[in-house]
Amino acid sequence: MKRLVRIFLAAFLSSGLALAAEPDAEGCADHPLLTRMSGYHISRCRNVEFETAPFADAKGKETSVEGKLTEIVYTLDQGQKARGRAQVVRNYENAIQALGGNLVHIVDGAMAYLTATKGGKTVWVVLNAYGTENVSLTIVEREAMRQDVVADADAFANGLRETGHVAVYGIYFDTGKADVKPESDAALVEIAKLLSREPKRKLYVVGHTDSVGQLDANMKLSQARAEAVVKVLTTKHGVAAARLKAMGAGPIAPVASNATEEGRARNRRVELVEQ
């Protein structure tokens, strides 16, 4: 009798009917670009509109990326057989390659850093498959933090008169780069308008960064960004080069705490300062 029960149970399990998929955690779902491996459910997730996350370049050097953040933890369903690390990593690598992306770096055959560009957005993926009973994905989609209010020429003039300097939010750069992004035009037009109205005014254009990364690198980056802004103002908006001087202050003059992303976002800015 016991033997018959074992045979029946084995047949039932092999049919796939006995082990229903476990439900996902409330409010959680797969990311639109990446599905899960079969036999897993989402045990935990987190979504943040704008956040910074660690990443690794091709040489394994740690850097940071920022944008819309999605974190998902996939847990093996009860009774399912665990996959090997290589199988998990290869599945996600193939999925990224199908999007036209690639594997950037891998550690211990288990921690994989991948990236792809889809729909004009750069997507970074960090896969943690050290324990394949729980596989985690961290996905960051590059999106500039939304700046709801861009100050105009009048606001810049008022700030300069009152304090001798004014922060300009609305000038955008990619992470770690100094190229001025096209969506910065609205703010740059207002700076040019200010200088057109006040032809005797001369300004320092000062670049500021947050404290993420090495000080020397941030100082160089802030200088390069300030120079890039000056270049756009002089070549595209007709401002005389003699009226502007680029300076880089890096992270040494914060206006908010660098302990939070909101604070770091405020610290990443360009300021106009009276000469």
Image (cartoon, rainbow, N blue to C red):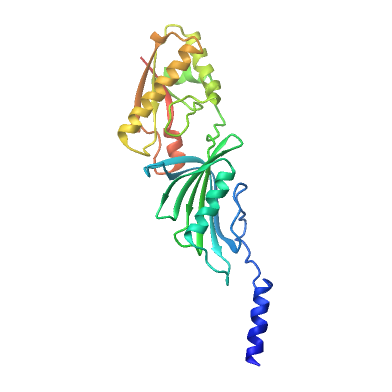
| Vertical comparison of 137 with 8: above or below | above
Image quadrant where one finds the C terminus = top left
| Vertical comparison of 75 with 204: above or below | below
Residue 239 in the image, given as x and y percentages of width and height? 46, 10
The residue drawn where x is 54% and y is 63% is 75
Of 69 and 164, which appears nearest the observer?
69
Image quadrant where one finds the N terminus = bottom right
Q: Is residue 202 left or right of residue 50?
A: left
Residue 220 in the image, given as x and y percentages of width and height? 34, 28
Residue 23 in the image, given as x and y percentages of width and height? 63, 64
Q: Is residue 62 left or right of residue 113?
A: left
* Total count of labels: 0
The residue drawn where x is 59% and y is 34% is 120
- Residue 151 in view in this figure: no
Of 274 and 239, which appears nearest the observer?
239
- Residue 40 in view in this figure: yes
Q: Residue most toward the bottom? A: 1
